[in-house]
Amino acid sequence: MLALKLTLVPLFLLIVSMSGKWWGPSIAGWLAGLPVVAGPILYLLVLAHGPAFGARAATLSLSAILASEAFNFAYAWTCRSRSWPLALASGLIAWIVAAFGLSWLPASPLWAAIVALVAVCCGQSFLPRGSAVAAGAPLSRADLIGRMVAGALLTLLVTSLSGRVGAAWSGLLAVFPLLGIVLSVSSHRAHGPDFVVSLLRGMVLGRFSFAAFCLLLSFVLPYQRPLVAFIEAALLAMFVQWCTKRLATTPRASGVSDRHEGGPRQQRHTERRA
């Protein structure tokens, strides 16, 4: 299990980092929405404390989307005019305040789903808009290795604490903004604030798959074998992730098609009227 902690998150960070280089920050942020960090943590909690504990932790992980969006919101607005240490400090303060507030909410899937939906809507509406950043921004080997090492260390820290503080805080810590911290700070240093803003806006779209993952676990864990429940939740998360990407790109494509076809169609229409 220690090998899983040390390799899974760094491997995913490598994939997300390279996707930012190949396809740009929006795609990297979208991929970061998959539950690759929280999923293994929740599975370890189920193995250690049982399905009921895991289901309650999954419910709090769902509501913790609000805390993650609070981190993104604070970091995105601060990084536009301040250095990365100040942006990171403001983001962590926002996450801690939001997490403490969420720890007092009822551990209800309905409440958690409402909180997560509000967080995603607010994140999409109120995050700053950065200028377009082209794919292929330079990424040094030292920066890439730094991201992976930081991911491994943070994963060990979160998983070590989560089993000692109860189901509520275990679920909240499972959604500690591990990827958000590593990707935001390293991207801020390497590519500047506009890249970070585009990355964090892309993360909002990826929240839907994470929400689906946690919501399904909160319902099925008490009634199914843990491995089966996590496989079902992972498949659902990947399907929702695919759907959100389709929904995000289809209107854009149709808009481009309409612009290309608008000229000839408008011309034929004008000719018929003449």
Image (cartoon, rainbow, N blue to C red):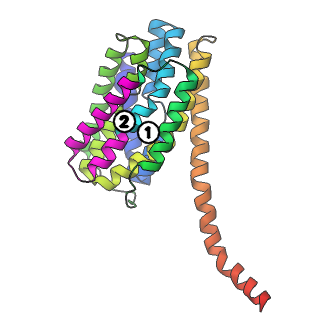
The residue under label 1 is 32
The residue under label 2 is 179
Sequence-wise, which precedes: disc 2 or disc 1?
A: 1
**212 up-or-down from 266: above or below:** above
Q: Position of residue 132 (x, y in %)?
A: 40, 61
* Side (left or right) of 223 relative to 140: right
The one nearer the camera, 63 or 193, is 63
The one nearer the camera, 250 or 95, is 95
Looking at the image, do the residues carrying marks 2 and 1 touch, with CB atoms under 8 Å apart? yes
Location of the C terminus by quadrant is bottom right
Residue farthest to the top? 49
Q: Amino acid at mark 2?
A: Leu
Location of the N terminus by quadrant is top left
Label 2: how many Cα within 10 Å (few below 14, some 14–19, many 20+): many
Q: Position of residue 233 (x, y in %)?
A: 58, 25
Instruction: Give the quadrant of residue 98.
Output: top left
Q: Main secondary structure of the magenta part?
A: helix
Q: Amino acid at mark 1?
A: Ala
